[in-house]
C-alpha cells in the first residue's frame, strides 16, 4: 500500500478490531475497574489512532461502534456482560464515535497535506540570470502562445537599460 492511500474498508475494520482489543487490554492493565473515565480515554485513543491511520470513514465509524461493546462488556462490567447504563453509556458511545470521526478526518487531512507537498510545482522552476530568461516546465505564462511540442518553454525578458540618476 502506497503512502497517502486510505486503507481498504475490510482491512481497516480488522485493524480497528485489533486496536480496540489492544486498547482495552492496556486500559485494564493501567487502571483499576473504578477508573471508568481513564479506561474510556485509553480506548478512545486507540480508536482515534486506528481511524487516523486508516483514513477510511466507514471503517472508522465501524471501529467506534465496535469499541462500545468491548468497553462495556470488559472494562465497565468486567464480566463480559453487556448492559445499558443510561446517560453514562450515551456519553461513552458519543466519545468513541467522535474519536473515530476526528481520527479519520485528521488522518485524511494529514494525507492531503503530504500529498500536496509532494506534487511537482508548475510555477517558475529556474532562472538563468545571465541570459535573462525564465524557463517554465509545464505551462507558459498567461497570454503567451501554447507550445506545439512537449518541450519546455523559454520566455525572453526584455532588457531594461540601467537608470541614470542625475
Image: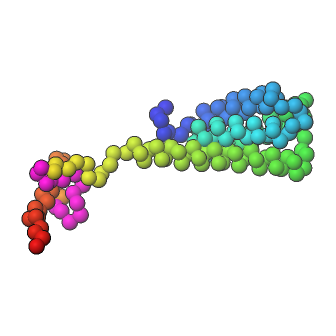
Q: At which x and y percent is residue 123? A: 29, 53
Quarter-of-image position of residue 80: top right
Give the farthest residue toward the front.
Answer: 166
* Nearer-the-camera pick, 82 or 113: 113
Q: Identify the residue at horizontal 76%, vertical 40% (top origin).
A: 41
Count of numbered badges drawn on the protein = 0
Res. 164 image quadrant = bottom left
Vertical relation: 147 (above or below) 62: below
Where is residue 83 drawn, in percent x and y?
A: 90, 40
Q: Position of residue 28 (x, y in %)?
A: 82, 29
Q: Main secondary structure of the magenta part?
A: loop
Q: For residue 12, say whether it is visible.
A: yes
Range of magenta residues: 130-145
Where is residue 65 drawn, in percent x and y? 74, 42
Which image quarter: residue 31?
A: top right
Residue 142 shown in magenta: yes
Looking at the image, is 162 positioned above or below residue 86? below
> As drawn, is 137 to the left or to the right of 117?
left
89 to the left or right of 46? right
Can residue 69 be seen by looking at this rendering? no
Q: Nearer the viewer, residue 162 or 148?
A: 162
Q: Is 6 a magenta residue?
A: no
Residue at horizontal 32 percent and vertical 49 percent from the top: 121
Looking at the rendering, in which quadrant would you find the C terminus? Answer: bottom left
Direction from residue 132 to residue 71 in the image, left or right = right
The residue most toward the left is: 161
Amino acid at each position: 500500500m502506497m503512502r497517502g492511500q486510505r486503507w481498504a474498508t475490510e482491512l481497516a475494520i480488522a485493524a480497528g478490531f485489533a486496536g480496540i482489543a489492544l486498547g482495552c487490554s492496556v486500559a485494564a492493565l493501567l487502571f483499576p475497574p473504578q477508573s471508568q473515565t481513564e479506561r474510556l480515554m485509553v480506548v478512545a485513543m486507540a480508536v482515534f489512532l486506528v481511524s487516523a491511520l486508516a483514513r477510511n470513514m466507514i471503517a472508522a465509524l465501524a471501529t467506534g461502534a465496535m469499541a462500545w461493546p468491548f468497553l462495556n462488556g470488559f472494562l465497565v462490567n468486567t464480566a463480559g456482560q453487556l448492559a445499558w447504563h443510561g446517560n453514562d453509556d450515551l456519553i461513552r458511545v458519543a466519545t468513541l464515535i467522535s474519536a473515530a470521526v476526528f481520527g479519520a478526518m485528521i488522518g485524511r487531512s494529514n494525507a492531503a497535506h503530504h500529498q500536496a507537498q509532494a506534487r511537482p510545482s508548475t510555477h517558475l522552476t529556474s532562472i538563468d540570470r545571465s541570459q535573462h530568461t525564465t524557463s517554465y516546465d509545464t505551462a507558459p505564462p498567461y497570454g503567451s502562445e501554447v507550445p506545439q511540442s512537449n518541450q519546455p518553454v523559454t520566455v525572453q525578458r526584455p532588457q531594461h537599460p540601467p537608470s541614470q540618476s542625475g
